[in-house]
Amino acid sequence: MVKICCIGAGYVGGPTMAVIALKCPSIEVAVVDISVSRINAWNSDELPIYEPGLDEVVKQCRGKNLFFSTNVEKHVSEADIIFVSVNTPTKTRGLGAGKAADLTYWESAARMIADVSKSDKIVVEKSTVPVKTAEAIEKILSHNSKGIKYQILSNPEFLAEGTAIEDLFKPDRVLIGGRDTPGGQKAIHALRDVYAHWVPQDRIICTNLWSAELSKLAANAFLAQRISSVNAMSALCEATGANVTQVSHAVGRDTRIGPKFLNASVGFGGSCFQKDILNLVYICECNGLTEVANYWKQVIKVNDYQKSRFVNRVVSSMFNTVSGKKIAILGFAFKKDTGDTRETPAIDVCKGLLGDKANLSIYDPQVTMDQIQKDLSMNKFDWDHPIHLQPMSPTTVKQVSVAWDAYEAAKDAHGLCILTEWDEFRALDYQKIFNSLQKPAFVFDGRNIVDVKKLREIGFIVYSIGKPLDSWLKDIPAMA
Ligand code: UDX
Ligand code: UDX
Ligand code: ADP
């Protein structure tokens, strides 16, 4: 029986291993983590992450060929294939701070593998890492090898949160990079055999190590760039009277461009896009490619601009002040169908409004009060470095409350900001909300999900990203 061990039971490791276990009954899969509370949650009925369809997959395999454990050394030493799926946050200090990936967790995982291994291993990079990380990992393993042979593979994961199970069941592609040596090719085949249980052969792409590592960064940079491109257009649409939804539709019908990932929004978030682009920028700079670095940096600048543009719209529409006004925030997660808040645009928007002394009442179907308070009290990039957590300042605590539903959040508020595209926000009784709001009643739709015409008929003043402006907003400049 082939034994697989995955180090890191997070958003990537957990769902990926659960699907491998489901699709490969002949393989034993152990997912290990140093966090006792995370492993306990994986072994309970309340999984540590919310992901549609994940519960069923875990229930079917857990205890049969899928195990969650904190006994890292035991499972690593017994495994034939070790996936490493630990976090690689952006460095907050030292060389490359604010850009480079922090590989501390990766290095400690590699050293541990070298310490406890007694037989040959295939080590698979699953978490996104800077190009050439495999070389560093190889060095750590081979210099501590005690005669054991290691093969390093890069097998980046392309699943998106909220659709992880769907993406894992039917991936567009599986990418496996390895050394061009007989040993490297043998390792690639061993991993390909795992995926071949359910992924058609023509969707399994095999490349060299560096292509695989770089492809992951490139794919995320291209996706994020599409969003920044359409978001940049949204500002121009507002200035000209064009409608960004119509523009995206027309542009996306060109098959060379394609229709996906062209939704204008308050900005992209999530643990990958910004982090991976910063990483790419850093790699370019280290290689003396300043122009290339600047090109990708701009994708992040437009994303930051989009968030501050949104805050400006809110404040300027409400007579240039939100001080002491209650504003309802609908949605805090970085996208629908997840409880994940890493790099969510909601953090910057809320901080912007709090800076203008607004009182926020926040509702998200999957994000806890605890998480919201942590996020609003953290500095940029601290989300993966819990050690730097600062308690919220007493004024901020007073300005933020968390509501149980959208109606409670909206009660007596001056306006509503929709920051996540949860389906339930499309189906709200907006007449009921209008009745409970202060007048004039504002809706700022950061995800273009409301029916603008219907809401205007009810009496709302509506701002929807990149859509023709309400006469109310027309004369107010978007950016001060
Ligand atoms: C373009 C648009 O494609 C067309 O829709 C529009 O109506 C007019 O402008 P055209 O300039 O004739 O058409 O050719 P196109 O095939 O788009 O190529 C433009 C340039 O891009 C060429 O120099 C081509 O060699 C280059 N190119 C194209 C690349 O370098 N790489 C590619 O992947 C595609
Ligand atoms: C992304 C990649 O899609 C995935 O392949 C990779 O493995 C990890 O990073 P994820 O961050 O989970 O996945 O979510 P994604 O669906 O890509 O959305 C990222 C952000 O972009 C979200 O904040 C989303 O709301 C935003 N977005 C997406 C838009 O603003 N407009 C769009 O058209 C699409
Ligand atoms: P991702 O979104 O990439 O899956 P997460 O932060 O959700 O990232 O998950 C990474 C997991 O890796 C965390 O649960 C963390 O506790 C775990 N981890 C980090 N370093 C180690 C290590 N050396 N050994 C075991 N687990 C680790």
Image: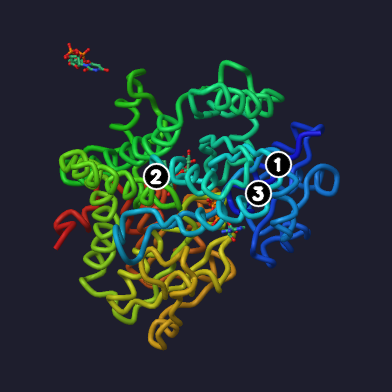
Q: Say if residue 27 shows up in the picture.
A: yes
Q: CB at mark 3 closer than 8 A to ligand 3?
A: yes
Q: Are marks 2 and 3 in contact (CB under 8 Å)?
A: no
Q: How far across and down, in percent of the image, does residue 144 sit?
A: 56, 50
Residue type (three-letter) at the residue carrying disc 2:
Pro
Q: Nearer the viewer, mark 2 or mark 1?
A: 1
Tell me the residue at 54%/39% (across/down).
159
Crowding near the residue tagged with mark 3, few <14, some 14–19, many ≥20 C-alpha atoms within 10 Å: many
- Judging from the image, the colouring scheme is rainbow
Front-most of 432 and 160? Answer: 160
Q: Which of 76 and 55 is in front in this view?
A: 76
Taking 394 as reference, is 114 above or below it? above
Q: What element carries label 3?
A: helix
> Furthest residue to the front?
147
Distance between mark 3 and mark 1 Cα atoms: 25 Å
Task: Work out which quarter of the rendered image holds the C terminus and state it.
Answer: bottom left
Q: Name the residue under label 1.
A: 119
Local packing at callout 1 (Cα closer than 10 Å; few below 14, some 14-19, many 20+) is: some
- Badges 3 and 1: C-beta atoms under 8 Å apart? no
Left or right of 376 in this view: 174 = right
Instruction: Name which residue type carries label 3.
Output: Gly
* Up-down relation of residue 175 to residue 120 (above or below): above
Q: Badge 3 is on which residue?
A: 14
In the picture shown, does residue 368 fall above or below 467? below
| Element on which disc 2 rests | loop
Closer to the eye: label 2 or 3 = 2
Query: Counting residues from the N terminus, which is met first, the one under dot 2 or under dot 1?
Result: 1
Q: Is residue 6 above or below residue 417?
A: above
Q: What's the CA distance linking mark 2 and mark 3?
A: 22 Å
**Picture disc at residue 130:** 2
Residue type at numbered disc 1: Ser
